[in-house]
Amino acid sequence: MASTTEPSIADVLKSAVRDAQDLVREEIALAKAEARQAASRVGSGIALLAGAAVAALIGLILLLTAVSWGISEGFGLPAWAGFGITTVIMLVLAGVLAMVGKNRMNAARAAMPRTVDTMKENMEWMRARTS
């Protein structure tokens, strides 16, 4: 009869450590593969969004061209006047958007010092409580 020897505790622990190391390596490999796949999806999504932005810009240019021609034809003005009116309207819109954006940026920048001050006050309060 063949004798079966039981593995020692040290052998069992070594085997468990080896298995744990293998498992960790496999999990890291899986995470890397998933990260590569997600990055690939994000990259293709960004490319599609860039294409959509270019198409939207071309569409906007064509729309504004049609509006300019429509203004000149509808009011019996020369073509340059229709394009001039459209240009002025777009410049006013750009100015309004720039002012609103600047005001929001300034408001966000002004909010940060209050947050920093509040955090400093909280730290001082915690130090006073723990000392």
Image: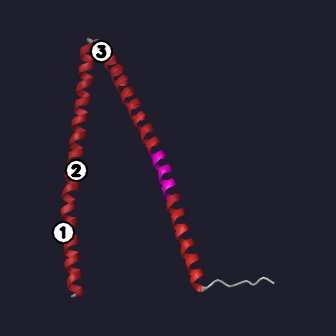
Position in image of residue 60 (x %, y %)? 36, 28
**In the rendering, which numbered label is found on residue 72?**
3
Residue at 47%, 45% (x, y): give it: 40
- Which amino acid, mark 2? Met
User: For the residues marked 1 and 3, what is the alpha-carbon distance in whole angstroms?
Assistant: 58 Å
Horizontal placement of 22 versus 94: left or right?
A: right
Total count of labels = 3
- Which amino acid, mark 1? Asp
Q: Circle 3: is it few (<14), some (14-19), or many (20+) Cα within 10 Å?
A: some
Q: In the rendered image, which quarter is residue 50 located in?
A: top left
- Which amino acid, mark 3? Ser
Q: Which residues are magenta?
A: 30-42
Position in image of residue 101 (x %, y %)? 24, 45
Residue at 18%, 63% (x, y): give it: 113
Q: Circle 2: is it few (<14), some (14-19), or many (20+) Cα within 10 Å?
A: few
Dot placed on the residue nearer the N-terminal end, 2 or 3: 3
**In the rendering, which numbered label is found on residue 78?**
none
Secondary structure at numbered mark 1: helix
Q: Nearer the viewer, residue 124 or 30?
A: 30
Look at the picture and state if 29 lies above or below 11.
Answer: above
Q: Nearer the viewer, residue 49 or 37?
A: 37
Position in image of residue 83 (x %, y %)? 27, 19
The residue tagged 1 is 117
Dot placed on the residue nearer the N-terminal end, 1 or 3: 3
In this view, which residue lies farthest toward the right?
1
